[in-house]
Amino acid sequence: MTLSSMARLVSLSLRRDRPRAAFSTFGVAVGVGALVFFVALGLGVARVIREKVFPIDSALVDVVPPAISLGSLLGGGKVDQATMDRLATLPNVLHAYRKMNVRVPAVSRYEGAFFGSHLRMGLEILAVGVDRGLVEKDVQLGAFADPNPGEPIPAIASSRLLEIYNKTFAPARKLPQLSPKLVVGFTFPVEFNRSFVAATSDGQVMAERLQIVGISDRALLAGVTIPLETAIRLNRSASADAQTFTAATLVARDPSAVPKIADEVKRMGLQTDDQERRLAQNAGLAVALTTSALALLSVLICVLAAVNIAHALSASVRARAREIGIMQAVGASRSDVRLIVLGEAAAIGLSGGLVGTIGAVLAAAVVDRVSSSYLPSFPYKPDSFFSYPLEVIAGGIALGMIAALSGAYFPSRHAASMDPARTVAE
């Protein structure tokens, strides 16, 4: 039997029993649509967590002193220049960047024009100094170095802090929302070794100005990132520790080498600060578990659709027993009969997979439209909550085909095993 002849027979059978075909197609479409919708939702939320909420560079390793240290007795305890030199020579380490907190409190009191609005504020500020190389690619204005006397200190703000400002702080206080390019160049006063609430050191109060020169994912979330030389100078002027570093950031030659570097760091008596990595993993795991549970429910719907197709085709085969016997009597082989039944199921599965996938995409578009119109703005709110890689689309259509063909397996075998002489005689 030629392929065109078989296609005509399959089409004729489906048109003759349209209600059964439509009901079976609907069942497959519901299961496939639910699966594609929930998997795309899980992928979309995971993308937001990975790229916006916890934008972790997989090649970076943050090294910090241990919480409890016995000093040199066990070979570690602090991050000084000698330790940095050892870290820089570890296998698979491409760069080693130093970090030092400004170890005195700081406040900013600002009153004046603020991007078309009037702003009056007073707040505590945290600052950390880093080597230029760590944030060099994000510097958009001037040089990231300790400035000359009278010049503002270059500072880099966190992209996540800007997102939180735009989505929560600014709307609550009717302030303008800011883009990264707009923020660059903004200058504000800061007084180091002064605090509204905390104790200060015996050193002098240092009145400085900070100028935002860039926005970076690598910047301090709850403060500003300044040149390391500036942090050392401020600590020294305030009679604070200006010798030991707060942390170090190592850049691996390849992300796959990160576990080996972490092991070497621990052998040196230091620790790796992977708090954000763990938070990202936990959030991703929660999303994955939820998505898996909903996907399992969708697969169960597809299984029920396969069972329905099996019942429907079994009834159809019994009702067409005489017709099948006549086809066999005039030359149709058992494989031809089996392929006709499987062809009907494949058509139902393909139609259900296409309809379900298209329905899922349309439902996702509606959800995105409703969320953008009615949900309030919040940090990291994405333009779309869904992600549709080609694998998800192809997988949805393939699942419809698999469900339908699985349901048609036994009915097709039963149809092929019929005795034409007996069925025609009946």
Image: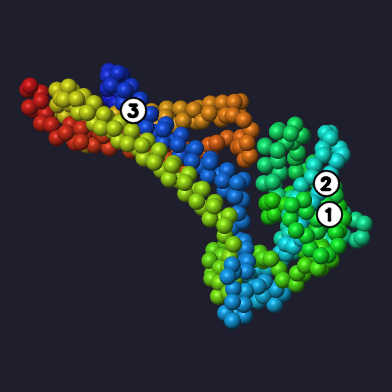
Q: Quadrant of residue 10?
A: top left
Is residue 232 among the parts visible in the rendering?
Answer: no
| Mark 2: amino acid | Arg
Quadrant showing the C terminus: top left
Q: Looking at the image, is 318 positioned above or below residue 160?
A: above
Task: Report the residue at 82% width, 39% height from top.
Answer: 120
Please report whichever mark, 3 or 2, sits nearer to the chain's N-terminal start. 3
- Mark 2 secondary-structure assignment: strand
Quadrant showing the N terminus: top left
Horizontal side, residue 382 vs residue 6: left or right: right
Task: Report the residue at 35% width, 30% height from top.
Answer: 28
Horizontal side, residue 197 vs residue 340: left or right: right
Nearer mark to the viewer, of 3 and 2: 2
Please report whichever mark, 1 or 2, sits nearer to the chain's N-terminal start. 2
Image x and y of residue 114, in percent? 83, 38
Q: Looking at the image, is 270 positioned above or below residue 363?
A: below
Image x and y of residue 231, in percent? 79, 63
Image x and y of residue 354, in percent? 42, 30
Nearer mark to the viewer, of 1 and 3: 1
Q: Residue furthest right?
A: 150
User: For mark 1, what is the residue?
Assistant: 191
Q: CA distance from mark 1 to mark 3?
A: 68 Å
- Mark 3: give few (<14), some (14-19) or many (20+) Cα within 10 Å: many
User: For mark 3, what is the residue?
Assistant: 27
User: For mark 2, what is the residue?
Assistant: 109
- Mark 2: give few (<14), some (14-19) or many (20+) Cα within 10 Å: few
Image x and y of residue 36, in percent? 44, 36
